[in-house]
Amino acid sequence: MEETLKKTIFSGMQPSGLPSLGNYLGALKNWAALQDDYNCVYCIVDMHAITVRQDPAELRERARNLLTMYLACGIDPEKSVIYYQSHVSAHAELAWILNCYAYMGELSRMTQFKDKARRHDENVNIGLFAYPVLMAADILLYNADLVPVGEDQRQHLELCRDLADRFDALYGDVFTVPEAYIPKAGAKIMSLQDPEKKMSKSEDENDGNVIFLMDEPKVIVNKIKRSVTDSGSEVRYAPDKPGISNLLNIYRAINGETAEEAERDFDGKRYGDFKAAVAETVVGALTPIQNRYEELAKDRAYIDGVIAKSAEKARTMAEETLAKARRAVGFPDR
Ligand code: TRP
């Protein structure tokens, strides 16, 4: 397909924890698969990360590790733009402009803000409140047509669309109004101990809930073995079997099977055998990624090169849209 005919995809991930199996199966695996059919821009949103307190040295290290992990998961810097949000100052500039078009009322209704404000009640800062506006700036700067996001980011994407429409209604055609991209094989991976909750590194104190992409095989096997056991003994999808259903989803997200095929694989098998098979599947998927990660991490010069070159590409793309927005609101040319 011609570069110019391809649609643009934008997505981002916070470097606020260690990347998890949920990040891989819910996002990174799909991001890599989209690279041939779309122009993809994948950001490491370190500016979003500081809306909750971070240790500076740790944040810097995690951002680099996450970028290395993007590459290890098959995101190719020759095809896609992979960069740190804080390396492209256009994000902050457009976010400021958009802040002046976003209402207190609509931001107050964001469920993630309400939730985080409750959990970090000692630090309900303006950045946390304006988080969705910065996210809108991310997306709009690159004229993204499609944004792969999970359910929890839908409301933010809706706000982004509202801001783009509002701005364009005032000033003409400045922004591309993006749409949510729901991948066909997207998987929402839940906590191993509490399968009603999302598997999330930053929102979970108990490490047993989360498989990290760099967990050693024996750790992975153990976490899956100790995952909640539902009532009954059959391996099948059922509303009263959230733990088993989650493991089936993990298994299928890796091998691409349908629900029926996966259930058939474990017909007559016990939970113990099933868990062992899921663990083996996960280890099989993660081992090559871990090996690639180790190789890449050693090559500091290569990673530095990717960071510098990609940031340059991102800046060029972002500056073009920022210039239009600046002109639209009446800033003098520079
Ligand atoms: N808020 C998103 C999350 O926590 C991360 C993010 C920031 C993002 N900017 C984005 C996702 C732009 C998609 C597009 O998951």
Image (tube, rainbow, N blue to C red):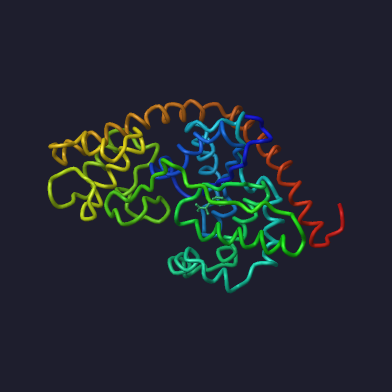
- Answer whether residue 161 is visible to the viewer in this image: yes
- Answer whether residue 58 is visible to the viewer in this image: no
Nearest the viewer among 154 and 230 is 154
Residue visible at 33% across and 50% down? 190
Measuring from the top left, give residue 323's x and y in whole percent.
79, 51
Nearest the viewer among 256 and 323 is 256
Given the current orientation, which residue lies at the most extreme right position? 333
Residue visible at 79% across and 57% down? 326
Measuring from the top left, give residue 79's x and y in whole percent.
60, 31
Residue visible at 29% across and 53% down? 195
Please tell me whether residue 5 is drawn above or below residue 145 in the rendered image.
above
Measuring from the top left, give residue 36's x and y in whole percent.
56, 31
Q: Quadrant of residue 220?
A: top left
Q: Quadrant of residue 151?
A: bottom left
Residue visible at 57% across and 46% down? 146
Q: Relative to 21, is 221 on the left or the right? A: left
Check the picture and name the quadrant holding the N terminus.
top right
Measuring from the top left, give residue 42's x and y in whole percent.
57, 41
Nearest the viewer among 116 and 251 is 251
Please tell me whether residue 278 is drawn above or below residue 326 in the rendered image.
above
